[in-house]
Structures are given as C-alpha cells and as structure tokens.
Image (cartoon, helix red, strand yellow):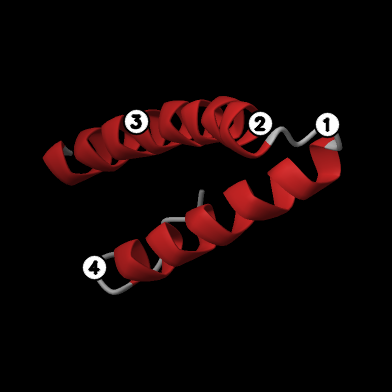
Amino acid sequence: MKNNALLLHLKTILSLLGEEIVGKAREEYEILNPTKTCDLVYQVQTNLNNGLKKHDRNYVL
C-alpha cells in the first residue's frame, strides 16, 4: 500500500513539474506554438517515465 501511495505522490509531482516546464519553456524560448511546448514536455515525461519503469512496470505517467 505504501508503494501505491508513493507512486501516486510521484505522479502528482511529475504532473506539476510538467506544467512548470511548459510555462518556463514558453517564457524562455518565446514559444507561441503549444504543440512545440507539448513535444518538449512529452520528451521530459518519457525520460522520467523510463526511469520509473525500472522500479515499477505498471506505472505510467
């Protein structure tokens, strides 16, 4: 049960981090096209997700 709670907590944190990355990327690179920003966030989430999968095969962002 503790593992599920921890994974849910991590998922929430990573989701908030993804939103923060979107905002910072738009500001820093003056990206007006949301698709480009979403692609950047998707790449970051994929990399984080691949790291988490090493510990729990059922966890997906």
Above or below, comparing residue 46 to residue 11 in the picture: below
Q: What element carries label 1?
A: loop
> Along the polypeptide, which appears first: circle 4 or circle 2?
2
Residues at badges 4 and 1 in contact (C-beta under 8 Å)? no
Give the class, few, some or many, for how many residues have Cα within 10 Å of label 3's Cα (few <14, many ≥20).
Answer: few
- For the point 83% across and 44% down, which residue is it? 35
Q: Is mark 2 on a helix, strand or loop?
A: helix
Above or below, comparing residue 14 to residue 58 in the picture: above
Find residue 12 and report its image quarter.
top left
Q: Residue 41's spot in the image, x, y percent? A: 59, 47
Q: Mark 4: which amino acid?
A: His
Instruction: Name the front one of labels 3 and 2.
Output: 2
Give the class, few, some or many, for how many residues have Cα within 10 Å of label 1's Cα (few <14, many ≥20).
Answer: few
Find residue 9 and report its image quarter.
top left
- For the point 13% across and 38% down, which residue is it? 2
Instruction: Name the front one of labels 4 and 2.
Output: 2
Q: Name the residue under label 1.
A: 32
Q: Is mark 4 on a helix, strand or loop?
A: loop
Give the class, few, some or many, for how many residues have Cα within 10 Å of label 2's Cα (few <14, many ≥20).
Answer: some
Mark linked to residue 13: 3
Mark linked to residue 16: none
Residues at badges 3 and 2 in contact (C-beta under 8 Å)? no
Q: Report the Cα–Cα distance between label 3 and label 2.
A: 20 Å
Residues at badges 1 and 2 in contact (C-beta under 8 Å)? yes
Q: Mark 3: which amino acid?
A: Ile
